[in-house]
Amino acid sequence: MKNPAQEMLNKGREELAKARRQGRTIFTAVFVFSIFVNLLMLTGPLYMMQVYDRVLASRSVETLAALTILVGFLFLMMGLLDYSRGRLMARVGARFQNTLDRRVFSAIMTKATYDNSGKVLPTGLRDLEAIQRLFSSPILLALCDIPWTPVFLMVIFIFHPWLGILATVGGLILIVITFLNQKLTSAPLQVANSTSMMAEHWSEQIRAEAETVQSLGMRNAGFDRWQKARGTALDKTISASDFAGVFSSTTKTLRLFLQSAILGLGAYLAIHGEISAGAMIAASILMGRALSPIDQAIGQWAMVDRAKKGWQDLAVLLGEIPTEPDRTNLPRPAAKLVAQQVTVIPPGHSQASLKAVSFAIEPGQALGVIGPSGSGKSTLARTITGVWRPAGGKMRLDGATLDQYDPDVLGGYIGYLPQRVTLFDGTIADNISRLSVTPDQEQIVNAAKRAAAHDMIVKLPNGYDTRVSAAGGMLSGGQMQRIGLARALYGDPVLLVLDEPNSNLDNEGSAALNGAIKQMKAAGQSVIIMAHRPSAIEECDLLLVLDLGMTRAYGPRDEVLQKTVKNHASIGQNKQPGGIK
């Protein structure tokens, strides 16, 4: 039996491998360059042999000058090739990241939309950056050089078997230490990374709710909890660093000792006439060159582990969140929305919060959705906007199910005002235009006027160019609500979904809201309002009453109110200041 989780993981790995294969040509060039770089590494030892065994013996300045010029040219070529392969690997990493940036960003957004568990979500983009940094780091080139270690050891064997044995034994010890380092430090490093991520996640939560934390006197308590998470992360990081440092220091010390040991053994053999003085020096240099990439790999293994963890996490993310399929572009839909036995199970839950809900709204109509807290109003809003997908039934816009529209295209047809309006770092114009890099200035102003926000905006210090942040900055809740409404109206959507739209609005704002609804209805567009306050459903033609996720009543507004709501007469006349009862 096939394992679904393993199949998704394999799909993610294949997608990553496909992106990596785009750099095959460059990888081949790096491999070829590495061959010549490592061959040219023999320049130094051979030069030393010639100087000690020929130049000093013959005292020929001409020979020394010729050798030095040749060696200078060879070292220049080696430096250029080494620099070139480093730049090529940096471009492999950049191409890999550029290929997957949009895909990973989209997967993170989808994951965040569908994950309601409260867990720390995969970092995604940071994982991608970790892989990119590995591609451009010296450690990957060191891994390319490690296969040449046996070649250098063979050259040392040619000088003398005893020198070769010493170098080989030392190299094997370093290789064993490398594998132990990889095996024993991997888990501590992963724990350190995960605890650091949790601490960062907690600090971001505290920062995002700074106003609440400050107003409720939670600063010290928040700091204590953050410090506890931070302290745990710091302890794990130091522990992992200390553990990895043992291997790094051991290999460095052993490598330096082996270079001295082979020099000493070479001197002993030279005294007995078994090798020349030049061979003794050359063997020491080759020994250092043979063991250098191993030492470098051990010293920077944390980067390899982070990239491996990032590769694994990305494979899980991309396997779990498939690529959005290409969709046929549909014409601009009419404002006709039909829900057919829609059942919705929120992500992270096992029970449905909407159960077999059906309704229909025609162009020029407004539908009010009322019900107590937890009845499923916000769930319905998320389903209509395509954020959550029905587990059963169909939601159709002008006859087509919502999944037949590209998410960004659907977002252009549907304006959405959530309960809690969040602004993004940028100007007010940026926020109204939905962060478009090529906004329509006329539509920005038009949307603001329809939301009765224009006069308020132009009174700000820099008008539409006033910068705001996620917390809203100088803006009140009602002002943020109006900007959120303007953002929902930007682009002239065919359907407007309002979730508790007047929760922060004053009388002027509520009047502007009702005016915007009237305009949309007159233009043949539709509006759906999730409401608790009676003034929000003044302009509604239809009413849907939800209770525990099920339809309690549905039909013309006045008929439904008369049957289900005690204070229906005062609601119709807009005299009831409280909620719907």
Image (tube, rainbow, N blue to C red):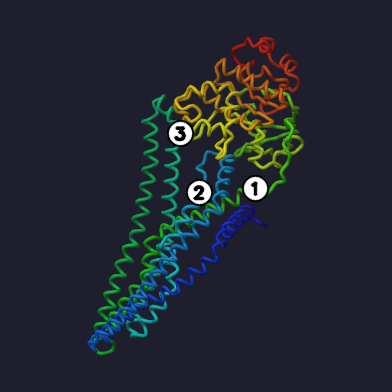
Q: Which residue is mark 2?
A: 125
Q: Amino acid at mark 3?
A: Ala
The residue under label 1 is 324
SS at mark 2 in the image: helix
Q: Toward the viewer: 215 or 139?
A: 139
**Residue 488, image x and y in percent?**
61, 30
User: Dividing the picture into quarters, in which one does residue 232 lie?
Assistant: top left
Q: Could you tell me if residue 269 is visible in this image? A: no
Spot occupied by residue 559 in the image (x, y as percentages of width and height): 75, 16
In this rendering, the answer to whether 526 lies above or below 183 is: above
Q: Which mark is residue 208?
A: 3
Callout 3 crowding tier (Cα within 10 Å): few <14, some 14–19, many ≥20: few
Sort mark 1 into few (<14), some (14-19) or many (20+) by Cα contacts within 10 Å.
few
Locate residue 266 relative to residue 382 in the image: left or right. Answer: left
Which of disc 1 and disc 2 is earlier in sequence?
Answer: 2
Q: CA distance from mark 3 to mark 1?
A: 30 Å
Split into 4 quadrants, where in the image is the C terminus? top right
Q: Of 519 and 310, which appears nearest the observer?
A: 519
Residue occupying image coordinates x 33% and y 66% = 251
Instruction: Categorize mark 2 by other alpha carbons within 10 Å: few (<14), some (14-19), many (20+).
Output: some
As drawn, the residue found furthest toward the front would be 442
Q: Quadrant of the N terminus?
A: bottom right
